[in-house]
Image: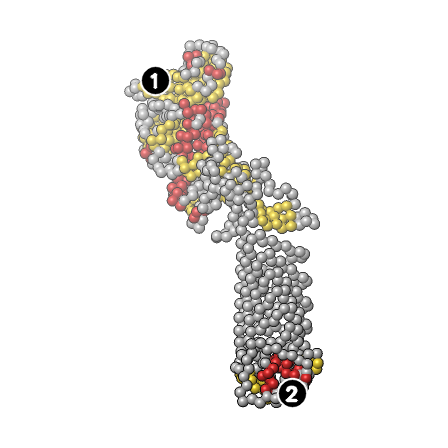
Amino acid sequence: MADNEFRIKSESPANDDLMFWRIVGQESLSRPSAYELRVLSKNDSIDPKKILGYAFDVAIEFQDADGAKHERHAQGHAVRFVRAAPVGRYTQYHITLRSWFWLLTKRTNSRIFQEKTVRQVIEAVLEDSPIKRFQKTNFDQVKGAHPERRYCVQHQESDYQFLSRLLEDEGIYYWFGGHDAPGTMHFADNSIVAHDKLPAVDTLLGLKSGASETRYNEFDFFWEAQAAESGKYASRDSDFKAIKVKLKGDKSDPDSHELADLEIFEFPGGYFQGDDSGEVAKIRMEELAARRQFFHGLIAWPDVAPGWCFHYAADGPGPQDADYLIGRCAFVVAHPGYEGTPLNSFRNEGGELRKVLEALSPGDPLNAGDADLVDEFIGIRAENGSTSVNQSFVIAALPAAVPFRPQRQTQRAIMPGPQTAIVVGPPGEEIFADSHGRVKVQFHWDRYGEEDEDSTCWVRVSQPWAGKGWGGYFIPRIGQEVIVDFINGSPDRPVIMGRVYDDDQPIPFASHTQSGFRTRSTPKGNASNFNEFRFDDEKGKEQVFLHAERNQDIEVEADETHWVGHDRKKTVDHDENVEVKNNRTEKVGVDETIDIGSNRTETVGANETITIGSNRDETVGSSETVSVGSDRTHTVGANETRSVGASETTTIGASRTDTVGASMTQNIGASLTQNIGAAVNVTSGGAMTFTAAGGFNIIAPGGTKIVDFSLGQIGGQNQIGYAFQFNFSGINTEANAVKAEATGCTNAAIGIKTEFVGCDTRSGMTVQQMVALEALSNATGIEMDALKVFL
């Protein structure tokens, strides 16, 4: 096999001072490539600043069996520079190179992505990174459906860790090109169709029986290794929008061994919809199946590199003819030597190569086993005296027909505990929530959010009680600080667990003995606009306080009981309406005072009974009208006094009966007028006395009849009249058996004409008869001359 040629290409100012000496590399699917490049230089004081950070491309030029030249590259950025022991007359330097993607381990960030696919997230992270000038990506082999992630959070993770776990979750893997376009990061999600055959020779052979030295594309060893992996995968998850739907993803692909029915169960499954669960289960099962069978080989052919397929042509026992995908490659390539240096014969003394490989990938379980194989394979080759030890490539390959999925080795981000955040929303809004009562927040660590409705996803809010259309419900408002926890520790699943006060949102009560609830009217409410329910527990001043900024509605479907141990005061600044649809009983133990500033209307649909145990005073400042639609009975057990300050009018539509058990006295300060529509009957069980200081007039156009009339005192003297009767009909007057005596009386009659027809009159009356006649004339309005006719 012809000697290789080596070139180091870099923009480093010290590049021309460097001579290739040896390179140890570790390359893998879904891992950044890592190399230890050892160089020699005549310059014994190279400034590390001229090395660190620069990209170096180490090209290994080799020839195939036909003498055609090919190149194999190892490309990375210098992240470590060490001055080592000299080699001959040269100074030796060790430079650690890593793929540009590894540089993201040096950048930690916290940020939120919403409604983005994993590719969009990757591109956004790389675009925001200082290494964007280095990044070269190729997504041509990502063929599967990778839906947008509704909410995806990077929290205190390096960019490398964040992107690595996303890729692993999605079943997307990557590798770095070792041939054309070195340093390009290729992505794929279907290994069956994503990879080409090796560019130089696509078929690799096994070492022929009896051969002592491999040639070109022949393996020294190509061994098979199998492992017992679980043959079933199951997961569960939940979606609060369909909480009764059991989200599950089950997949089985058992192997033929005795433990094939072992199952891996995961919760949460990492999906929010049942439609996603099947794809997730498929990816997880393929991840398990890809670990069952690997083939390890040792070869001196530099063409091998991860991401390439080859056909293995078997010769003898062991793996049979098949196509394989190279998953990992660990190698060492050394320069044979320069003038002035000893022969560069790499014998792997003391497990030197193993130490280098372990230093390149500390703690990486994926590559840990490769160091053991390299140690074993190269040790065997060295023991056999092989001259190709300086050019050894140890590969791990899997059958190309088996889908490859990356192992989920990257630690998931686990939130260490609750955090606080500020509720946010659109400008000008005070409350911003969706139909599920979710709000949006701005985390204190979020440097990209703009404290608006796009800062986070909708975040559910824990409530004191959550039933089916019932429970407690308090919505955090914009500007309030809330406590956010994370379901299962996932930063992608925040939930608000509480609220806290701060200097911008102070506590509502000045005294620490007070507790309760105080709201704020919205929109544009101020400190004086609120509803409040407050407790004060200060000893001796205990209080329950309720304030309604506007209306208060209380509904009690059954009984309501109030007990007040002392005074009760109720003030209604406007109207009050009380409706009792059944009976009402009101009991006042002592006095009751009702003060009505204006009118009062009281309507009783049926009977009303008022019982007063003692006195009652009723004062009406102005008019009073009492209207009784039917009968009214007024009973006074003792005396009744009624005083009317002005006129009184009594109208009775029918009969009226006044019954007075004893005497009745009427005192009228002025005139008395009685208008009676029909006859008047006055019956006195005893004497009847009329006293008229101004005269006594009887006007009876229909006639006057007096039966058994006795005149008491006339003209200052006592007179007695017996059995006389007057009948006056029109102008007719009859007097029968009247005896009148009048003495010293005068009578005046003006404008009266009396005619007597068929009457016998006598004269010669005594004084007493004349006085009586005058009194009778005054009482009846009849001329005395006319009366004389009858006497």
* Residue 624 to residue 190: above or below: below
User: Quarter holding the C terminus?
Assistant: bottom right
Dot 1 alpha-carbon crowd within 10 angstroms: few under 14, some 14 to 19, many 20 or more: few
- The residue sitting at 35% across, 33% down in the picture is 142
Q: Is residue 258 visible?
A: no
Q: Is residue 72 visible?
A: yes
User: Quarter holding the N terminus?
Assistant: top left
- The one nearer the camera, 690 or 450, is 690
Residue 721, given in percent of the width and then of the height, sits at 66, 85
The colour mode here is secondary structure
Disc 2 residue type?
Answer: Gly
| Quarter of image, res 592 | bottom right
Report the side of 486 relative to 138 (left or right): right
Residue 529, given in percent of the width and then of the height, sits at 55, 44
Query: In this figure, which residue is indicated by the disc labeled 1?
Result: 2
* Residue 170 to residue 240: above or below: above
Query: In this figure, which residue is indicated by the disc labeled 2?
Result: 764
Say which of marks 1 and 2 sits in front.
Answer: 2
- The one nearer the camera, 624 or 146, is 624
- The residue sitting at 61% across, 70% down in the picture is 671
Q: Dots 1 and 2: beta carbons under 8 Å?
A: no
- The residue sitting at 54% across, 61% down in the picture is 579
